[in-house]
Image (cartoon, grey):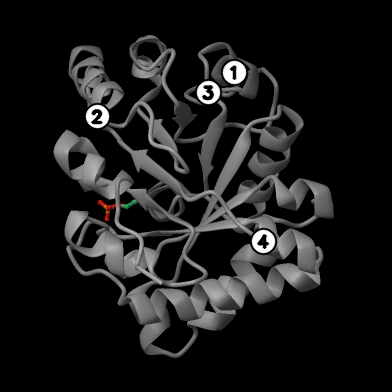
Amino acid sequence: MTRTPLLAGNWKMHGTRQEAVALAQKLAETIGRVPGREVVVAPPFTALECVGRAIAGTQIRLGAQNVHWEPKGAYTGEIATAMLSEAGCTYVIIGHSERRQHFGETDETVNRRLHAALAAELVPIVCVGETLAERDADATAAVIERQVASGLAGASSAQIARCVIAYEPVWAIGTGVTATPGQAQEVHHAIRRQLVGLASDTTAGRVRILYGGSVKAANIDALMAEPDIDGALVGGASLDAAEFTRIVRYEEKEG
Ligand code: PGA
């Protein structure tokens, strides 16, 4: 089963429209067309449309950083699937650890957002990851298993096949500390095994599992050499056109 590697840039709360367009234009030139790779950028909501225009006609796809589960209503500060689709999004990041840590995101709200995204034909990038305290307490496997199971609860096998999962250890996000390729592979492999139970062998073989947490040009090759690492969700390094370009153009291990 071959999975097309997916390299996604999460711009977080960075980029006025002007800055975002400048970055998107550079990326359109350097990685607008990379055979065998899928590329997504997730700028802030206000920059979605202008970034969409800057990458039009390239293979770079547009993603959002969050989505609400209701189609509309009195939910100040939230955004609906139709608004994201209208702005040109085809992907949406769900349950990022910063949302879980700072904005009260729970496994249950992650699941509600997931179902809204699937119903709207957006590809959800569902984030899971343990904290340092959880890793130190040997709870990594249990935490990830719980987050995956509750995040995907109620999704059919066909729906799970359309999901992307991002394993992002909280202790590696924005810290400069990356999980070793071996540490990441171990968790990715466990997630894939869990997907066999939740869906099927075929689906588990299809779902892309991204690694995230201080991914940079210097460590992408080694991460991508692991059999169950199918791409990366990149924060800080995705704001630097040269870095992100090198990440997208990572080198596959020979043989
Ligand atoms: P980072 O962020 O690459 O800056 O560590 C990753 C993420 O939060 O998706």
Q: CA distance from mark 4 to mark 3?
A: 27 Å
Name the residue: 32% across, 48% down. 234
Q: Which residue is mark 3?
A: 89
Give the SS element for disc 4: loop
Q: Which residue is mark 4?
A: 1
Name the residue: 71% across, 27% down. 120
Q: Which residue is mark 1?
A: 85
Q: Quadrant of the C terminus?
A: bottom left
Q: Earlier in the sequence, mark 4 or mark 1?
A: 4
The amino acid at mark 3 is Cys
Q: Earlier in the sequence, mark 2 or mark 3?
A: 2
- The quadrant in which residue 205 appears is bottom right
Name the mark nearer the viewer: 4 or 1. 4
Q: Earlier in the sequence, mark 1 or mark 2?
A: 2
Name the mark nearer the viewer: 4 or 3. 4
Give yes or no for contact between labels 4 and 3 (Cβ–Cβ under 8 Å). no
Give the SS element for disc 2: helix
Name the mark nearer the viewer: 1 or 2. 2
Q: CA distance from mark 2 to mark 3?
A: 21 Å
Q: Which residue is mark 2?
A: 30
Give yes or no for contact between labels 1 and 3 (Cβ–Cβ under 8 Å). yes
Q: CA distance from mark 1 to mark 2?
A: 26 Å
Point out residue 42 in the picture as x, y percentages from the top left corner.
Answer: 39, 32
Give yes or no for contact between labels 4 and 2 (Cβ–Cβ under 8 Å). no
Is 55 located above or below residue 109 in the figure? above
Point out residue 55 in the picture as x, y percentages from the top left corner.
Answer: 37, 17
Numbered label tally: 4
- The quadrant in which residue 206 appears is bottom right
- The quadrant in which residue 85 appears is top right
Mark 4: give few (<14), some (14-19) or many (20+) Cα within 10 Å: few
Mark 3: give few (<14), some (14-19) or many (20+) Cα within 10 Å: many
